[in-house]
Amino acid sequence: MDSSSTVLFNQLKSSEPFFLMAGPNVIESEEHVMRMANHIKAITSKLGLQLVFKSSFDKANRTSSKSFRGPGLVEGLKILEKVKVAYDIPIVTDVHESIQCEAVGRVADIIQIPAFLCRQVVLLAIVNKSLSIYVAHDLFKLQTDLLVAAAKTGKIVNIKKGQFCAPSVMANSAEKIRLAGNENVMVYDLIVDPRNFEWMREANCPVVADVTHSLQQPAGRKLEGGGVASGGLRELIPCISRTAVAVGVDGIFMEVHDDPLSAPVDGPTQWPLRHLEELLEELIAIASVSKGKQSFKIDLAPFRD
């Protein structure tokens, strides 16, 4: 197991009041990502928050083939490595295929498994009714192979809970990482249900709230020239993040952009950079007074006057 990953993993587990995973949804250019990393690092350093910088090199899981994809694996990893060195911050980015894991593991500190893969299982099973059992079996095998490949890099593996999965499923997903020889695993949720944050603790690993993707409205916008793009409910990002820190999550995942209206991917669910410090200050205040990470001891003995 990568010793530096274990050190980072322990730092994240002990982060108070929470750690932040943040950055633009996708790499638009080297200049843009470097500038975003500079600003976000300055804000989190000022507030005393542990930061993991996030951006994707390839948005392969888009609904429309006309959607912006990003620079791709090779160029994208070069850019993320420059961010990592320049600002001395750990990196998290997505993988979509087992074959990507080794290369991504040489740069990223955390390898993220997208929840969109769970959507594929359900959607393909529905579309291919006569082959649903076989389609689902093959896709679940691909998911297991991806989890194992990510685990074998020795890096921290961050697994998104699919929208159609019960919270209890994440314990099994986390166990696949551990059985592959990697104890550094985190789980996080896309569904806005505070109960999930409690139940997912059964996976015995850090729980992260994805406060921006949980507000995505798939295929909610039409693109000029055809195709569709995701819509979103940006105005509810404070609501969801307030709830998450009050419940006591270990980390917050939030995509941030300096010009959300011009963002090529998921603009409607990216939080404006100009408001990041203000929102984080409030979340820190909420987390500092919440006992959300502690179980409430309920006494069921009869009450007597």
Image: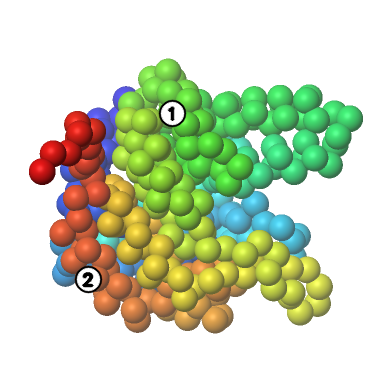
N-term mark: 2 or 1 = 1
Q: Residue at x 54, y 81 (%)?
A: 261
Q: Residue at x 53, y 55 (%)?
A: 57
Query: Residue 74: x percent and y percent?
Result: 54, 50
Quarter of the image where one finds residue 220: bottom right
Contact check, label 2 and label 1, Cβ < 8 Å: no
Query: Residue 260: x percent and y percent?
Result: 50, 78
Query: Residue 176: x percent and y percent?
Result: 47, 23
Q: Residue at x 57, y 63 (%)?
A: 216
The three-letter amino acid code for the residue at tag 2 is Glu
Total tally of numbered discs in the picture:
2
Identify whether 178 is placed above or below 15. above
Report whether residue 230 is seen. yes
Quarter of the image where one finds residue 49: bottom left
Q: Is residue 62 left or right of residue 166?
A: right
According to the image, label 1 marks what residue? 171
Identify whether 88 is placed above or below 121. below
The residue carrying pointer 2 sits among few (fewer than 14), some (14 to 19) or many (20 or more) residues within 10 Å by Cα, namely few
The residue carrying pointer 1 sits among few (fewer than 14), some (14 to 19) or many (20 or more) residues within 10 Å by Cα, namely some
Where, quadrant-wise, is the N terminus in this rendering? top left
Report whether residue 29 is seen. no
The three-letter amino acid code for the residue at tag 1 is Ala
According to the image, label 2 marks what residue? 281
Q: Does dot 2 land on a helix, a strand or a loop?
A: helix
Q: How far, Cα to Cα, is label 2 from label 1?
A: 32 Å
Q: Does dot 1 land on a helix, a strand or a loop?
A: helix
Where, quadrant-wise, is the C terminus in this rendering? top left
Residue 265: assigned label: none
> Who is closer to the viewer here, 26 or 304?
304
Identify whether 36 is placed above or below 164. below
Query: Residue 61: x percent and y percent?
Result: 65, 52
Q: Residue at x 38, y 30 (%)?
A: 203
